[in-house]
Amino acid sequence: MDILTVVAALMLMQDPKPEAPQETTKVVSKAKSGITFYGFVRLDILYDTDRPNNVQVPQYILSKDTPPGGEKDLSMHPRLTRFGMDFDGPVIEDLGNAKLTGKMEVDFYNLLPGTGVITSNSREFLRMRHAYLQLAWDSWSVLAGQREDVIAPLAPTPNNDLVMWNAGNLADRRPQVRVEYKSSGITATGMIGLSGAVDGSDLDANGFLDGEESAMPTFQFRIGYETEGFVEKTKIVGGLWFHTAKEEPDTAVAGEDSFTSNAVGIDLVLPVTSQLTIRLEGWSGKNLDDVRGGIGQGVVNGQEVSAKGGWLELNFKATATWTPTLGFYMDDPDDGDIAASGGRDKNQVIAFANRFRFGPVEFGADVLSWKTEFTGGLADGKDLRFNFFAAYNF
């Protein structure tokens, strides 16, 4: 028997149809926790016909009477590139069979503390967006860590840099503890969080945040309701909410050493047809710079700045891949509370935004007509802003 005959006989003794290798997904886990990665890689290109206060992070448009107002600009950045991890933990029997979950999420949209200045245009720094754990039971949940505010839960479509903060949209992210109850379409959410986490207010310039010096947290509460929509497979979602916080500098400012921040507002998502959805938020309050209101003017000359505003969007699903949006946004501080000359009196924006989605690839093309009014006879700041982006979602 030659060698070839021996090899053939041995092969016939094996399984004639071995199983094909199976595709597997590697799950990173520790202490019985699974981790799911997500995020996107993105590039934004920005063009302004007139100069905003910050090319990449616009909050208002400069007046032509205050150079470099009125000048055009072009910028691009990958700062919104995002990476996140969702943690799926075990059920904790000793805590009443609570389900443990968590999230950690970062991007690269960082600014130098207290300046609003971009850190770098080619060596961006990490910025924490979310970092929290959550314990959930049948109807109740408790969350601890950094997450977005409870108030103003909707996110406008355009102005990807600051999601229309200081132009009609309230709420940012902050360290917090929140408790939530859900039952029969009703959601009640309460939160205590760090005051001054966003504006970093230090009116007496003593190196300590005025919100921390008050020894009081930010309090927020929202009651929401969800029901079946008029259109099949849609939901109508609405909510009422309020916010309150204190700032107490050690040294009096313009004769005052205690300042209150508060706001009340509503939110609504209303599907009108299978293609058209109305989304809106409206609010009123005072000293709102820590929740992105009043065009960044919280306390001026010892006076809490009152403001009102909100936004309205018409989101239309034109095709399976194209979703255009028409929106109106406004932040209107009380002109009697701000600086008599050069105070930012009103932000008003009309936007037409477009999203094109092809599987994991998304393109955006937005046009925003900005107008910022000022006190003291300064010319309005007016800008036609174009924002284009490309993203790979994973």
Image: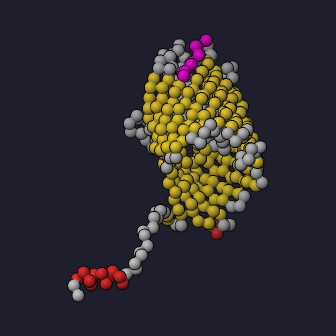
In the rendered image, residue 258, in percent from the top left (x then y), is placed at 67, 33
Left or right, 132 with reference to 334:
left
At a point 66% along the width and 55% down the height, the residue shown is 142
Report if residue 206 is visible in the image. no
Q: Please, which residue is most extreme toward the bottom here?
A: 1
Q: Nearer the viewer, residue 258 or 199?
A: 199
Magenta span: 377-384
Residue 23: image quadrant is bottom left
- Per the image, is 383 magenta? yes
Q: Nearer the viewer, residue 149 or 312?
A: 312
Q: Nearer the viewer, residue 132 or 380?
A: 380
In the rendered image, residue 65, in percent from the top left (x then y), is placed at 53, 13
In the rendered image, residue 265, in percent from the top left (x then y), is placed at 72, 36
At a point 41% along the width and 35% down the height, the residue shown is 120
Answer above or below: position of 14 versus 80.
below
Task: Give the mark count.
Answer: 0
Answer above or below: position of 374 versus 56.
above
In the rendered image, residue 239, in percent from the top left (x then y), is placed at 74, 42
Q: Please, which residue is most extreme toward the left here?
A: 2
At a point 47% along the width and 18% down the height, the residue shown is 71
